[in-house]
Image (cartoon, rainbow, N blue to C red):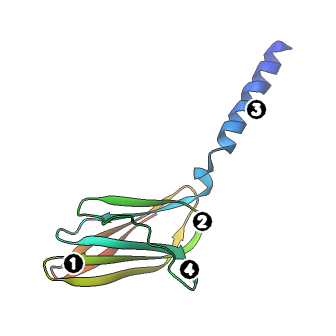
Amino acid sequence: MMRHIGLVALLGATMLSSAGCPTTYTASYRVTNAAQGVLVMELYVSPSGSATGGANRLSQPLYPGQTFTVTGLAPGYYDGMAVVYIPGSGQWAQLANPLVELRAGQTYTQTVYYTDPSIPTLKSEGN
């Protein structure tokens, strides 16, 4: 009888500890700056179809080689937009990626890179 009580207590503790871990029910959106000479100044991730892009998720610029991840997002469809600045030329650009599906427990990854030396691009890595 004591063996069964110990097993039930162990299972109960396991279920409680996993219930307090919401990361399996949320999604993440990651942006990596792989473009030399480009700063990601702003990042917006908002539910698709919302009237506004929401708040800028970055508190400081994302320099080449750096990555930033927005966590705790409810699964669903989102619009992503990065605002980049190229200090050498003084150019600004908005790199949009509308209608991205974010799935629970997964991270959607995007990379800012150059396809042309003067035009930064946002590349999807997928889920």
C-alpha gap between disc 1 and disc 3: 53 Å
C-alpha gap between disc 3 and disc 2: 28 Å
Q: Earlier in the sequence, mark 3 or mark 2?
A: 3
Label 1: state its secondary structure. strand
Q: Residue at x 29, y 59 (%)?
A: 66
**Contact, mark 1 vs mark 3 (Cβ under 8 Å):** no
Tell me which corner region of the image, top left, top right, bottom left or bottom right, holds residue 18: top right
The disc placed on residue 115 is: 1
Label 2: state its secondary structure. loop
Looking at the picture, which amino acid does disc 3 mark? Gly
The disc placed on residue 85 is: none
Q: Residue at x 77, y 19 (%)?
A: 6
Q: Is residue 15 left or right of residue 103?
A: right
Q: Earlier in the sequence, mark 1 or mark 4?
A: 4
C-alpha gap between disc 2 and disc 1: 31 Å
Q: Residue furthest right?
A: 1
Tell me which corner region of the image, top left, top right, bottom left or bottom right, holds residue 68: bottom left
**Residue under numbered circle 4:** 48
**Residue under numbered circle 3:** 12
Looking at the picture, which amino acid does disc 4 mark? Ser
- Residue 5: % across, % down: 82, 20
- Say above or below: 119 vs 43: below
Q: Earlier in the sequence, mark 1 or mark 3?
A: 3
Q: Residue furthest front?
A: 59
**Contact, mark 4 vs mark 3 (Cβ under 8 Å):** no
In-front residue for pair 7/19: 19
C-alpha gap between disc 1 and disc 4: 27 Å
Q: Residues within 10 Å of mark 1 (few under 14, many from 20)?
A: few
- Say above or below: 107 vs 98: above
